[in-house]
Amino acid sequence: MPELTWQKSTFSGGPQGECLYIATAPDGTLRLRESDEPHVILAADPRGLAALLRRVKAGPARAVAGR
């Protein structure tokens, strides 16, 4: 895999120095990693990640019947 260009989140750098990084892979997926464990890399589809972020911003999830 080619070297990825990582960008630090603008929300990173809390009191403990936590940082979240994101990169776009050649196949169009997004890669995420944390500064404290940079060898652990998660892959996400851009639309899926956007949906997750919208849900997190909406607040606590409610139980849905049948799911």
Image (spheres, rainbow, N blue to C red):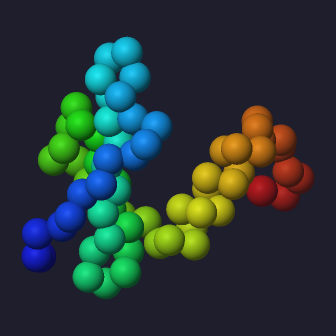
The structure residue drawn at horizontal position 32% and vertical position 71%, both measured from the top left corner, is 24
In the picture shown, does residue 52 fall above or below 62? below
**In the image: residue 48, left or right of residue 41:** right
- Figure disc tally: 0
**Residue 60 placement: quadrant:** top right
Q: Looking at this rendering, what residue extends furthest in the front direction?
A: 10
In the picture shown, does residue 59 fall above or below 22? above
In front of the other: 5 or 55: 5
Is any atom of residue 22 visible in this view?
A: yes
**In the image: residue 40, left or right of residue 63:** left
Q: Name the spot of residue 51 as percent of width and height, x first.
A: 65, 62
Q: If the image is split into quadrants, where does the C terminus sit?
A: bottom right
**Residue 27 placement: quadrant:** bottom left
The structure residue drawn at horizontal position 67% and vertical position 44%, both measured from the top left corner, is 56
Q: Looking at this rendering, what residue extends furthest in the top direction?
A: 15
**In the image: residue 1, left or right of residue 52:** left
Q: Name the spot of residue 42 as percent of width and height, x first.
A: 33, 56
Is any atom of residue 42 visible in this view?
A: no
Q: Looking at this rendering, what residue extends furthest in the left direction?
A: 2
Q: Looking at this rendering, what residue extends furthest in the right direction?
A: 65
The structure residue drawn at horizontal position 76% and vertical position 38%, both measured from the top left corner, is 59
Q: Name the spot of residue 38 as percent of width and height, x first.
A: 19, 44
The structure residue drawn at horizontal position 23% and vertical position 48%, both measured from the top left corner, is 40
Q: Name the spot of residue 64 as percent of width and height, x first.
A: 85, 51
Q: If the image is split into quadrants, where does the N terminus sit?
A: bottom left
